[in-house]
Amino acid sequence: MPKAWIRQRAKDYYYQRAKRESYRSRAAYKLLQAVKKHRFIEPGDVVVDLGAAPGGWTQASRKIVGEEGFVLGVDLKQIQPTGLSNVHTITLDITDPQAIEHIAALLPRPADVVVSDVSPDLSGIWELDHARQIDLARKSLQIATSILKPGGNLFVKAFQGDIFNEFLKDVRGHFRFVKLVKPKASRTRSSEIYILGISLKQADY
């Protein structure tokens, strides 16, 4: 890990705040800020956190839903237990064909919210990283539309680039209201942006 990057991180306000407040990552503040402004997670909700490791968003989600809610953290990497009540974590590749089935089986009821901060291992080749990230965002959308209750919400990360608008259009096809969100805790130089889908449309059969 480059020493310059380590020094820069040590000076980062949200990194230092996360350490003080016992969040596992500075990313927790992205979710907390977005929810404070847009109120898409509420006390008592069932939340599925995709790409959860190391667990910052899972912690933040549990803080919001309280003791009456439920949070499931999902990641390809193992997530250390949080020690929090009504929080469950699993090691699972969201691209697994059985992922939706595995996730749904662990929920007490259809989810109210799916949040996804999933990213690929970055290669440094932008076109490739962008395509891989959008693929994971699409998988997050597929999972969300399968496990959310009608009227449920999705908050998903996407990298801005050539195929971003196509993915945004897909999200708009599934949710009644869609917003682009850039939390203050997101680094200014980052190409990441979050798509907030409010109120999943009822499927037509």
Image: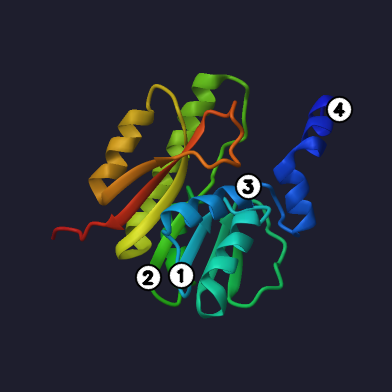
Q: Which mark is residue 153?
A: none
Counting from the top left corner in percent of width and height, residue 71 is at 54, 68
List the residue tagged with mark 1.
46
Q: Along the polypeptide, which appears first: circle 3 or circle 2?
A: 3
* Image depth: mark 3 or mark 2 in front: 3
List the residue tagged with mark 2.
110
Q: Residue at x 42, y 61 (%)?
A: 113
* Image depth: mark 2 or mark 1 in front: 1
Instruction: Indicate the quadrant containing the N terminus: top left, top right, bottom left or bottom right.
Output: top right
Query: Do the numbered discs 2 and 1 sit on residues whose CB atoms are within 8 Å?
Result: yes
Looking at the image, residue 187 sits to the left or right of residue 161; the answer is: right
The kind of residue on which mark 3 rests is: Ala
Q: Residue at x 62, y 52 (%)?
A: 28
Q: In 3D space, how far apart are the residues under numbered discs 3 and 1 (Cα atoms)?
A: 20 Å
Q: Which mark is residue 3?
A: 4
Q: Residues within 10 Å of mark 1 (few under 14, many from 20)?
A: many
Counting from the top left corner in percent of width and height, residue 48 is at 49, 62
Counting from the top left corner in percent of width and height, residue 146 is at 34, 59
Q: Along the polypeptide, which appears first: circle 1 or circle 4?
A: 4
Q: Nearer the viewer, residue 74 or 161?
A: 161
Query: Do the numbered discs 4 and 2 sit on residues whose CB atoms are within 8 Å?
Result: no
Query: Do the numbered discs 3 and 2 sit on residues whose CB atoms are within 8 Å?
Result: no
SS for callout 2: loop
Q: Along the polypeptide, which appears first: circle 3 or circle 1?
A: 3
The kind of residue on which mark 4 rests is: Lys
